[in-house]
Amino acid sequence: MARKLLLIILDGVPYGNFRRLFGNLEAWVASADAQVWRHRSVLPSISASCYASIHTGVPPVEHGCTGNANVFRLSPEDVFSQVRKAGGITGAVAHSFWSELFNRSPFDLVRDIEYDEPDSRTINHGRFHTMSGYGKVNQMTPSDVDLFATLTRLCERFGLTYGMLHTCTLDSMGHRFFHDCPEMDHACFAMDEMLAPFVTRWRDMGYEIIVTADHGQDARGHHGGRDPLQQETALYYFGPAKGPEPDAVIDQLQLAPTILSRLDAPVAPTMKAASFLS
């Protein structure tokens, strides 16, 4: 495959927090090294449902994952499986829900927390975490710089064609502190500062990069419904393709066919939305 791409999902970041607080990402937009658009999630705007739709290109009413309490191995074809059909190598560094949705379910802590399966039809190289014991007092989230480094190691070691990273830090911070507060200002600053050197490194390695979130959060730290604060986030793209006008809104169902089109992998018939990059 001639091209390769990384999808970075920073869970639970509303559009305004991306545009206001991520200075490095915004600097790349200002210098025309990145493009940015508004990105609207599916409904319900809840994490597992969005994960499923981002990678299958179908809405929750079709794939059946209606929330975090309803996670199972999905039946529609997905980005991982389609990249594998084209001969690519896939990897994921993410919450264990991703392994359950796209590899096997239920998640087995010992078997599935780390695996390298060259013959897998979906995820070849997986590094997962569970956040067991999560709550407001203890977020149970790994350090984001460790996750970025882990994805980079997978890219360097296995030559990933497609890699996906997902981190829950900012979603967890939003549930705890909401969004208009010093704690969230610092959390977004820290995420942007940790991410930036890896964006440069990944670009130097030849990757196109998409940075986005699965959904937003409202002023009370909630998401799941159709309030724009809950549904809308930002999407940054680093690469040579051209996207729509800056005021366009990217539908979440467009992500899967867009990624596959950039990788020259087959777009599954169930992925009916149009690519937003050309």
Image (cartoon, rainbow, N blue to C red):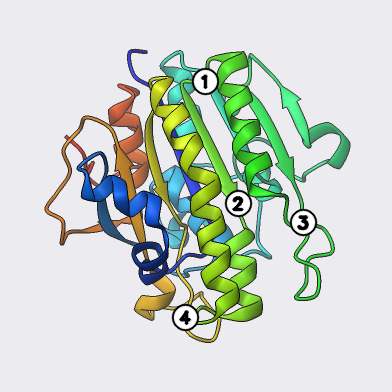
Q: Name the residue under label 4.
A: 218
2 left or right of 244 in image: right
Rendered image quadrant of residue 62: bottom left
- Labels 4 and 3: the sequence-earlier one: 3
Q: Distance between the residues labelled 4 and 2?
A: 19 Å
Q: Mark 3 points at which residue?
A: 131
- Labels 4 and 2: the sequence-earlier one: 2
What crowding class fits label 1: few (fewer than 14 Cα within 10 Å), some (14-19), or many (20 or more)? many
Quadrant where the image shows the N terminus: top left
What amino acid does circle 3 point to? Answer: Met
Residue drawn 58% across the image and 58% down it: 48
Q: How far apart are marks 4 and 1 (CA)?
A: 35 Å
- Labels 4 and 1: the sequence-earlier one: 1
Q: Distance between the residues labelled 4 and 3?
A: 23 Å
Q: How far apart are marks 3 and 2 (CA)?
A: 11 Å
182 left or right of 251 in image: right
Tell me, for residue 167, which label it has, or none.
2
What crowding class fits label 2: few (fewer than 14 Cα within 10 Å), some (14-19), or many (20 or more)? many
Callout 4 touching callout 1 (CB < 8 Å):
no
What crowding class fits label 4: few (fewer than 14 Cα within 10 Å), some (14-19), or many (20 or more)? many
* Placement of 199 over or under 43, stated as above or below: above
Residue drawn 59% across the image and 38% down it: 148
- Labels 2 and 1: the sequence-earlier one: 1
What amino acid does circle 1 point to? Answer: Leu
Q: Where is residue 165 drawn, in percent x and y?
A: 56, 41
Residue drawn 33% across the image and 42% down it: 271
What crowding class fits label 3: few (fewer than 14 Cα within 10 Å), some (14-19), or many (20 or more)? some
Rendered image quadrant of residue 87: top left
**145 and 5: which is toward the camera:** 145
100 left or right of 208 in image: right
Q: Where is residue 184 drawn, in percent x and y?
A: 56, 72
Q: Name the residue under label 1.
A: 160
